[in-house]
Image (cartoon, rainbow, N blue to C red):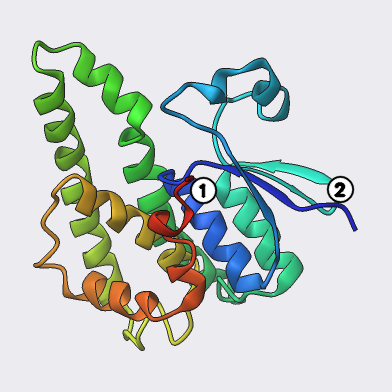
Amino acid sequence: MSKIVLYDYWRSSASYRVRIALNMAGIEYTSESVDLVAGKQRSDDYLAKNPQGLVPTLDIDGLRLTQSLAILEYLNTTHDLGLLPKDPAARAKVQAVAHAIAVDIHPVCNLKVANFAAGLTDTPNESRLEWMRQFIAPGLSAVEAMLASYDQTPYCCGDTPGLVDICLIPQLYNADRWGVDISHLPRILAAEQACANLPAFADAHPDMCKPD
């Protein structure tokens, strides 16, 4: 069996998602840190692995996979994680909530994007903070409204953690990092608490994965 290697960065939301799924699948892997702050993602060596210069990249089963949602789909299919309903309509509905986080909130709050926007102002630190809050807060409020159609038992969309939970928890880490108030979002808070009790989520937390 080929060695399973995850090229990631401890604070990356996309990497955080994949760490959770690998843990859920019980897959042992080696983590190779790609220091985004130091610009290692733009090195020739890493670009040869991932031409986009993004994390994560996962070497598994003789494959080299990129894009966290594609990796999650692969892990869900090959290890029967039950991240999505089988019924097509229910599946599409759950995917819509997950994409509201991973496709709408996360990309615009990627540090590369936020730093570029902040750099166009005379007060980059204040502008970066304002930028993050501007997009994270209403985005999470919309997710809270989307979750209203589900019985919380106790995860976002059912009685087992699914794709939405895997996307949500890393985004909540970022919300806390940038001082976004989520105290008025009870469904999200309940899902956060439920996931916090699971080793697969706890062991994937950035504080557990920060390089020495």
Q: Of marks 2 and 1, which one's residue comes earlier in the chain?
A: 1
> Where residue 58 appears, x then y in whole percent?
68, 46
Which residue is depicted at the point 21% across and 54% down? 176
119 to the left or right of 210 = left
| Quarter holding residue 147 | bottom left
Q: Would residue 93 be visible to someone looking at this image? A: no
Distance (Cα) linking label 2 and label 1: 20 Å
Please, what is the three-letter code of the amino acid marked with disc 2?
A: Gly
| Quarter holding residue 120 | top left
Residue 161 higher or lower than 106, as above or below = below
Residue 118 higher or lower than 11, as above or below = above
Which residue is depicted at the point 56% across and 19% down? 42
What kind of element bears circle 2?
loop
76 to the left or right of 83 = right
Q: Which quadrant is the N terminus positioned in?
A: bottom right
Question: What's the mark number on residue 85?
Answer: none
Q: Name the residue at the front extreme.
A: 212
Q: Name the residue at the right extreme.
A: 1
Q: Which residue is mark 2?
A: 62
> Where residue 14 appears, x then y in whole percent?
48, 47
> Where residue 204 appears, x then y in whole percent?
48, 62
Q: Which residue is mark 1?
A: 15
